[in-house]
Image (cartoon, helix red, strand yellow):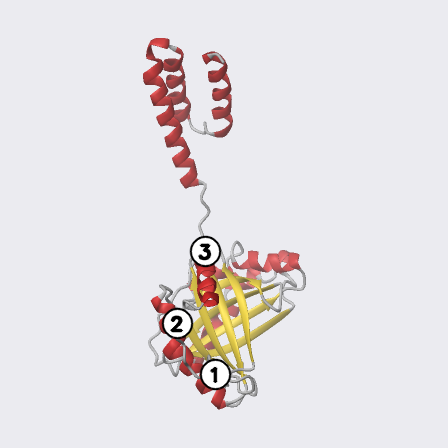
Amino acid sequence: MSNGFFVCNFKACLHHSFLRTNLRIHYFKKIIQLFCMKKHFSSSLGLLLSFLFLLNSSFSTAGKIPVGDYYQLSIYHIKNSDQLAVTNAYLKSTYLPALHKSGLKNIGVFDSIDNDTAIDKKIYVLIPFASLQKYESFTSALTAGTLLQNDTTVYSNAAFNNAPYERVEIIFLKAFKDMLHLKTPVLTAPRTDRVYELRSYEGPTDKLYRQKVRMFNEGGEVDLFNRLQFNAVFYSEVLSGSHMPNLMYMTSFNNKTERDEHWKNFVNDTTWKRISVLPEYLNTVSKADIFFLRPTDFSDY
């Protein structure tokens, strides 16, 4: 194969894939000229290879899509105070220490505010993962028994007719692109006063659900929450759950009064009034659920 054939095809390929600026075109032409001069073949080939390496590195970096968190939200459904005590003791003294030891952090553990009176009492455990690989390692360790070794707790060794919960619901989520990572909130009130508000929005169809996700990101809803200082913990799409298509997000407040004031400001904000009536965002939520939570004394935030 001749040098001319190689150069012509290589030049066409580079023109199609890489040459986006005058500087790259100028540099490439100089290299081609040197490459075609036999006496400079060796040195120009070295320059050519260096040029290709730099181009590949720059485009590899520029082409990378930012990677966001994945979340596992476990909801323990509990019927009585005995189950509540056993499960909380296990989470506090065994489960969370094991998660921390494995390198996981910023784990939120919350009780429903109405657990004292509710028939279906709930504990929520939110675990963030930096990647799917981290999540796979976590589940593999659980399955293999290496995450929780020599577990002799009442929770793990309960009899079939004395289970520490009724059911455990697990929801797997992926962070919105406008908030790729979990943020621990900045709150000053005692934990017993704090309010974490978990919201779940179901879409009537996949297409309309996607429009609601778009409203949060491109539509500016996340930016509005940020501007009004809602102290959001996460925004996410539900990848696996029982109410799909579905998105979920969590905001946080020092107390219920502060929460109510924030939402009053939200619905009266000119940005919300503008985007909420745009045709592309109408009828994108078929069901909205609101859960008021409070952090346990062993939650990471």
Q: Which residue is mark 1?
A: 113
- Where is 19 relative to 164, above or below? above
Q: Which residue is mark 2?
A: 149
Mark 3 neighbour density, 10 Å: few (under 14) some (14–19) many (20 or more): few
Identify the secondary structure beneath mark 2.
Answer: loop
Looking at the rendered structure, the kind of residue marked 3 is: Gln
Tell which of 300 and 228 is nearer to you.
Answer: 300
Mark 1–mark 2 CB contact (< 8 Å): no
Mark 3–mark 2 CB contact (< 8 Å): no
Q: Quadrant of the image for the C terminus?
A: bottom left
Q: CA distance from mark 3 to mark 2?
A: 22 Å
Residue 223 in sight here: no
User: Which of the two marks, 3 or 1, is nearer to us in this view?
Assistant: 3
User: Tag 2 or tag 1, which sits nearer the N-term?
Assistant: 1
Mark 1 neighbour density, 10 Å: few (under 14) some (14–19) many (20 or more): some
Mark 3–mark 1 CB contact (< 8 Å): no
